[in-house]
Image (cartoon, coloured by chain):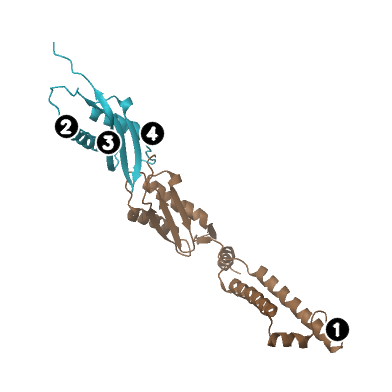
Amino acid sequence: MTEQALYRRLVRRSLHRSRSAAVVVALVLLSLVAVYVGIEATLAALGRGPLLITPADAVAALENPTTIVLAGAAVVAIIGIVFVLLALLPGSRGRHEVPNERLAVVVDDSVLAGAIGGVAQRASGVAPSRVVTSVSKRRGAVTITPTSGVPLDSAALSATAQDFVHTLQPRPAVKVGVTVAANGVVGA
Amino acid sequence: MIPGRVAISSRALERTVAAIAAGALRVPPSTVRVTLADEAGLLGVSVTAPLRTTALRSTAPADGIVTRVQAARRGIRAELTELAGREIGRVNVTISRADIREEKRVR
């Protein structure tokens, strides 16, 4: 494996959750069900009494379902939906890749948010405690509480923050918006 | 631009407003009470102060109370904008009592 390919693989593993835990659980459940069905089939073939229910009774119950059977089916369906979602969703870990010539760099979204918030705070001149920033996969949101009587230009602040993000070039790309709260605070 | 920022505490702003209002109304600063509030991003000012006036029987010429308080409000607004560099919203002035000064006879 070349170094570039290794880095790509490492970055991908850092950005996305592994599906191995879900796979292990799904396969263990599946094998337990298979073992149980096998046991019941064997007991029925040998003419012995069933462990819980004979295969013939089980098929009959499925053809004319009672409330309990329907409830059980619903539970199984929900478990199935959860596994489908675990398999299809990207499993993002709240991180972004930052391109670098020599290194594989992965940054937590909270760190990215702190950096963007710091830029917006210095550009706006308010106290750091009045700036709240959050970063999701493709969006960053900065909310600034202004000082009463000191108007802030949210468009200019958004442009400043976006310029900073452009210098970092996080992947996936992040679009930043700065919101100035409608009501300010009197003291500094 | 120099790195860093300027912060003015609300206490400092209040005392500044009190001093300006005292000057505009010509009463001692210690008799002026000030409340500052945010008004949709603007600085709202509420001043409670006595009104300095001459005795009711006085024959000295004077403007009406409303005229003088309006002038004081304009003065507070202009001076505060200049001193504190804040955009001012409402300026409320409440006259709590009269500060009556008998003018002295010219000897």
Tag nearer the camera, 2 or 3: 2
At 69% across and 88% down in the image, what residue appears? Answer: A63
Between B50 and A119, the one lying in front of the other is B50
- x and y percentages locating residue A156 in the rendered image: 33, 54
Name the amino acid, label 2.
Gly
**Disc 4 vs disc 3: Cβ atoms closer than 8 Å?**
no
The answer to whether A130 is drawn above or below residue A96 in the figure is: above
Q: Which residue in the structure is indicated by mark 1? A: A49
Provide the secondary structure element on which disc 4 rests: helix
Name the amino acid, label 4.
Arg
**Disc 2 vs disc 3: Cβ atoms closer than 8 Å?**
no
In-image side of B18 versus B67 (left or right): right
Tag nearer the camera, 4 or 3: 3
Tag on residue A138? none
Q: Colour of chain B?
A: cyan
Q: CA distance from mark 2 to mark 4?
A: 33 Å
